[in-house]
Image (cartoon, helix red, strand yellow):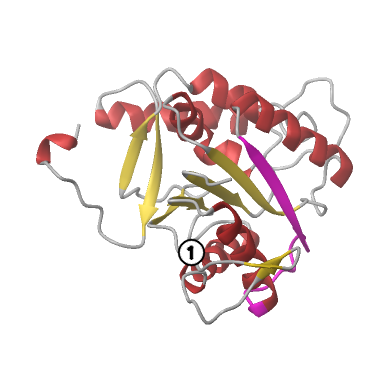
Amino acid sequence: MKLDILAIGAHPDDVELSCSGTLAKEIDNGKKVGILDLTRGELGTRGTPEIRDQEAKDAARILGVLVRENLGFRDGFFTNDETHQLAIIKILRKYQPEIVLCNAVKDRHIDHGKGSKLTSDACFLSGLRKIETSINGVTQEAWRPKKVYHYIQWEILNPDFVVDISGYMDKKMESVMAYKTQFYDTDSKAPSTPISSKNFKDSIEYRAADLGRIIGVEHAEGYTVERYVAVDSIFDLI
């Protein structure tokens, strides 16, 4: 199955928190979208890997993505080396996405920056024909995504461009709150974490609202780029 967009996150919920409004909008536009999680988030203070697996499935169903896979890298300890790069390359060649959305280039959680560079490097290497990979004994063709964009996470980075997600904020929040063990819940007896507070939950919406305000729409999500963004006409910019 060929995808238009593959969203990659170091942990289950990275994608939902950062770019799920964009994904939901593009799915409604008829685009084929998938999600790849690098780890199971097993070092998370709240919940278990098994619960996170189910929460990720629930979030994927809410968004309507076609596929969701998890590479099972070690949470907190994966590295940007050949073994990890090849695992991502196999997924890139399997689904041949035109666009890859991935972790913030710099962020509070060390896995986010690591995941960002690892994914970016794998996207480049995936286009090299002399790197041979196969799945189930079938040799894969080289494939390099046309664009790699980095979503914004904990740290407030200045985006290079923003996507209008007006009308998709409710679905974004529904997909985020599918991770019941991770986010604000007045009935939870689990230990508090930086992302389990009401303030953090509220920040998801007010950040999207602020980005939307700046471009004159209701809500938006921001991205940074590796190369210049080009438009066919200056009127393509809103």
Picture residue at 72% right of the left edge, 27% below the top: 178
Tell me the amino acid under the disc marked 1: Trp
Q: Residues within 10 Å of mark 1 (few under 14, many from 20)?
A: many
Could you tell me residue 137's position as x and y percent?
A: 74, 68
**Of 44 and 88, the residue lying toward us:** 88
Could you tell me residue 42's position as x and y percent?
A: 82, 52
- Toward the left, the furthest residue is 234
Q: Is residue 191 visible?
A: no
Picture residue at 39% right of the left edge, 47% below the top: 223
**60 relative position to 170: left or right:** right
Could you tell me residue 212's position as x and y percent?
A: 34, 28
**124 relative position to 202: left or right:** left
Q: Quadrant of residue 122?
A: bottom right
Which residue in the structure is indicated by mark 1? 143
**Of 225 and 92, the residue lying toward us:** 92
**219 relative position to 41: left or right:** left
Total numbered circles: 1
Could you tell me residue 8's position as x and y percent?
A: 58, 51
From which residue to which does the magenta span run? Answer: 66-82
